[in-house]
Image (spheres, rainbow, N blue to C red):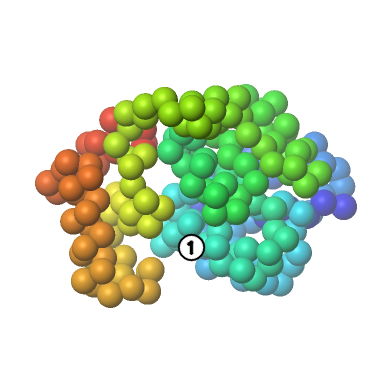
Amino acid sequence: MKKFLLIDDHAIVRSGMKFWLSAEYNPSEIDEAENGKEAFQKIQDTDYDLLLLDIHMPETNSFELLKSILNTKPDSKVLIFSMNSESMYAKRFIKAGAMGFVSKDWPIEELKKAVDLILNNKKYFSNAFIESALDEKIGKENNNPFSNLSDREFEITNLLLEGKGVGEISILLNIKNSTTGTYKARIFEKLNVQNVLQLNELAVLYDIKK
């Protein structure tokens, strides 16, 4: 029997996914978590065959959650399941240890393909992801300014886009306020924005924020 954990703050998404997983993988046991704290508790108590993790949830830093999951249970298999841009998020999360990325608005066949591959200890890459990786390898120019951010800068950018201030971010990431402030200034310089409002507008333009 397969065991799944759905980590998503939207009850209707969890309900739909639970129905689909129950039909496709019968018998199965499917648990739910609406935030990182609840998810981490369940992960400590149960060994899951697959975790399906959303990117943006209230009071949850999904990058840090993924790292904590893999530090606690290194063999965990995690599939990112999100509405956010594959081109900007997939590479970073896969680099951090996720085994695949599926957008919530893709055909259900792609989700099935991803789940089956990961359950069989293989990573899932979409055709677009593979093409993008090949373009990067041969040096084709990427005009998305968010691609120039380091993983930590991108992580802080997402927290800024969630409306968090320097103090909150410092607590979440366990770094000094001055360090967060330096990162923020560097992010604004790289993206050529003056404030969080402009950052939000740029994020929407490049499909970083829905």
Q: Quadrant of residue 113?
A: top right
**Residue 83 spot, x, y in % from top left:** 48, 37
Residue displayed at 18% across by 48% down? 189
> Residue at label 1?
64
Image x and y of residue 14, in percent: 60, 46
Q: Nearer the viewer, residue 142 or 85?
A: 142
Q: Secondary structure at mark 1?
A: helix
**173 left or right of 110?**
left
Residue 71 found in image quarter: bottom right
**Which residue is at the far left?**
194
Q: Residue at x 48, y 57 (%)?
A: 63
64 over 26 or under it: above or below: below
Between 60 and 85, the one lying in front of the other is 85
Tag count: 1
Neighbour class for label 1 at 10 Å: few (<14), some, many (≥20)? some
Q: Is residue 158 visible?
A: no
What x and y, as percent, mark residue 170? 31, 70
Residue nearest the observer in this picture, 157 or 41 = 157
Residue type beneath disc 1? Glu
- Quarter of the image where the C terminus is located: top left
Give the image location of residue 124, x and y in percent.
67, 37
Q: Is residue 95 visible?
A: yes
The foreground one among 205 and 25 is 205
In this image, 137 relative to 159: left or right?
Answer: right
Residue 206, placed above or below residue 97: above
- On screen, residue 93 versus residue 98, left or right, reads left
